[in-house]
Structures are given as structure tokens and as C-alpha cells.
């Protein structure tokens, strides 16, 4: 299923959303995360696991953790039906199956058609709805699957402690541009970079905001000082990271700025897309220690360290 994502022309700011239902409500997942859809099957329970974790499932050669999405989202499992489906996913280098009730279909839309949920709909730093999409006549809640997994297994998310393994660090004044829509991940990335000595960080909630800022300083004589390096997620409302990368690398003034795509979606297909767009590096979350090492190298290559 993920192989179809490469057919989307690079940098067009489009996304394919797979719609599915839980207790009759419409939800969505980026097709790029989906490996295949399977009929729900027998799952081997694992003792002392999270209440939403059903257990493990091995349809062929890949062992999958099965998360009961109805249980996670509502606290209720309802009747486990034979007609239930497993959406088998791959992101953050993990293979996870999510139980859902039905799969409705796939819609191709622009990221501009996805809006960030109002803060009244979320709790804490970040809710599990990463966006609300208009798919035809339907409003579809796009779920933050990375946050769902991080809630269940925090060790799968960014570990700030990785920076300590890099040894002693010196303070760096370079202005780092960060485009990331998750409030929680933005905080974790910033905390990690500050610990690594990169304290001058300008963060933006999506690619559109980052691009507007970069455009506003494009002709400044000190552009390199104001934007030494760009780190961008891929999945963001309004403008995704691929579109942002394309705009930067197509601009004769900005293209010298290193661009690192830092996303849970990095796989073979996504690396091809990133290379086509001119990204300098592509790293999978949650490799925060590796991110800092790559930042050091790219800035050194530019003679800025």
C-alpha cells in the first residue's frame, strides 16, 4: 500500500488519506504509513501490557503489535467482530497493526484542506487529532498515530537523554528553523537541541508559516545568520515538509541552506521523494542524537562551525 505514495508527484502538497470508522465515526491515516489491510485474526495476548494493546500477531514473516484503537480512543472495546480489520502500519521503524471497524476508502486532498484542531478539542500539550480534513462532504479526524504509540510506550518517542551520550557540547549561536506541528514533539526537539548547544531556535507550526518567515528574510544580507539550517517534519497542515523543501531548494538564494527532513515516515519510498526535492539529509524520528550529529556535519561543511 505504501508503494502507491511514491506515485504522488513530489512537492505538490498533496496527501492520500485512508478513511476508516470506529463506532461509526470517521477517522483517517496517511496512506504512506499503511502497509496493508488484513481481516482481524487471532492475537496472542502479552501479560502486563497496556490496556489498549491486544497482543502480538504474525500473519507472515513480520511480527506485529496489535493496538485496539476503539479501546484506546473511547475506553470501550464493544463486541470484537470477525468483520473487524487490522490496518498494518510502518512508521518510526515500527510495525504495528491497529484494529478498526471498517475501512471506507482513500481520498487525495491538499494539505491546505487539513486544519489543526482548535485547542478546545485537545487536552494537555497535544491531543491525538493531528488535523481535521475535508474529504468530499465528510469531515475526517486525522489521528496522530505517533502520539498514540508514544502514550502506550513512551520509550518509542524522542529521548532527550540521547544528547548526553554525545559528550561535552559547546554553545552555538546558529539560528535553526524548525517546522513541526506537534506541540509535544516541538518541545522535545527544542529541549534536545538546547541541551546540544543549539539554543537559537525559531519554531513554526507548519510549512506555510516557516516558508512565510523565510520569504520575509530572503533578501536580507544576513540571511545565513537568520536561517542557518532548516529541520522539517513531513506531515503538517496547510503545507507539508516536502512542499517546503521543494520551495526552499528551488529558490536560488535559499537553496544553500541545509534542509533536514525529520519524520516518522522515512522509508525507501520517502527517501526517493526527499532526494528528488534536494533534501540534504532525511532522518527517522526518534533519532534525536543522530539529528544533532548531522546538524554538526552540515554546518561544518558550510564552514559555519
Image (cartoon, grey):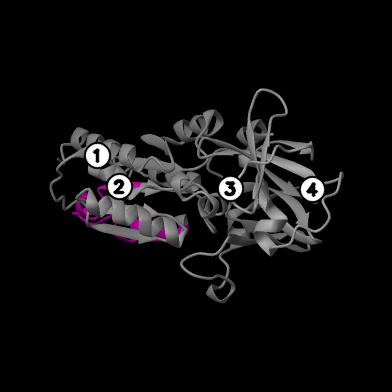
**Label whose residue precedes the other's in the sequence (1 or 4):** 4
Q: Secondary structure at mark 4?
A: strand
Which disc number belongs to residue 29?
none
Q: Position of residue 58 (x, y in %)?
A: 69, 29
Query: Which residue does the numbered mark 1 point to in the structure image?
Result: 165
**Residue segment shown in magenta:** 208-230
Q: Residue at x 59, y 61 (%)?
A: 131
Query: Which residue does the numbered mark 2 point to in the structure image?
Result: 161
Does 211 appear in magenta?
yes
Query: Which residue does the numbered mark 3 point to in the structure image?
Result: 48
CA gap, disc 2 to disc 3? 26 Å
**Label whose residue precedes the other's in the sequence (4 or 3):** 3
Q: Secondary structure at mark 2?
A: helix
**Label whose residue precedes the other's in the sequence (3 or 1):** 3
Which quadrant of the figure has residue 45? top right
Q: Nearer the viewer, mark 1 or mark 4?
A: 1
Query: Which residue does the numbered mark 4 point to in the structure image?
Result: 103
Amino acid at each position: 500500500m505504501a508503494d502507491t505514495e511514491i506515485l504522488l508527484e513530489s512537492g505538490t502538497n498533496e496527501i492520500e488519506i485512508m478513511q476508516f470508522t470506529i463506532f461509526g465515526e470517521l477517522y483517517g491515516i496517511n496512506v504512506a504509513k499503511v502497509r496493508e489491510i488484513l481481516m482481524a485474526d487471532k492475537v496472542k495476548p502479552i501479560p502486563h501490557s497496556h490496556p489498549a494493546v491486544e497482543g502480538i500477531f504474525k500473519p507472515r514473516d513480520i511480527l506485529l503489535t496489535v493496538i485496539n484503537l476503539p479501546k484506546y480512543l473511547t475506553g470501550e472495546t464493544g463486541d470484537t467482530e470477525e468483520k473487524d480489520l487490522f490496518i498494518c502500519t510502518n512508521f518510526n521503524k515500527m510495525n504495528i497493526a491497529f484494529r478498526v471497524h471498517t475501512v471506507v476508502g482513500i481520498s487525495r486532498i491538499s494539505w491546505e484542506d487539513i486544519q489543526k484542531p482548535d485547542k478546545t478539542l485537545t487536552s494537555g500539550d497535544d491531543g491525538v487529532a493531528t488535523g481535521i480534513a475535508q474529504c468530499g462532504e465528510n469531515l475526517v479526524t486525522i489521528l496522530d498515530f505517533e502520539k498514540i504509540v508514544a502514550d502506550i510506550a513512551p520509550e518509542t518517542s524522542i529521548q532527550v537523554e540521547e544528547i548526553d551520550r554525545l559528550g561535552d557540547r559547546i554553545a552555538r549561536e546558529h539560528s535553526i528553523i524548525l517546522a513541526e506541528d506537534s506541540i509535544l514533539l516541538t518541545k522535545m526537539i527544542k529541549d534536545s537541541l538546547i541541551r546540544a548547544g543549539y539554543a537559537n531556535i525559531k519554531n513554526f507550526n507548519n510549512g506555510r508559516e516557516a516558508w512565510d518567515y523565510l520569504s520575509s528574510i530572503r533578501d536580507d544580507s544576513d540571511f545565513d545568520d537568520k536561517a542557518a539550517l532548516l529541520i522539517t517534519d513531513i506531515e503538517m497542515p496547510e503545507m507539508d515538509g516536502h512542499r517546503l523543501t521543494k520551495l526552499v531548494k528551488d529558490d536560488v538564494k535559499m537553496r544553500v541552506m541545509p534542509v533536514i527532513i525529520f519524520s516518522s515516515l522515512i522509508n525507501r519510498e520517502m527517501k526517493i521523494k526527499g532526494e528528488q526535492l534536494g533534501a540534504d539529509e532525511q532522518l527517522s524520528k526518534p533519532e534525536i542524537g543522530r539529528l544533532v550529529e548531522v546538524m554538526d556535519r552540515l554546518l561544518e561543511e558550510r564552514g559555519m562551525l
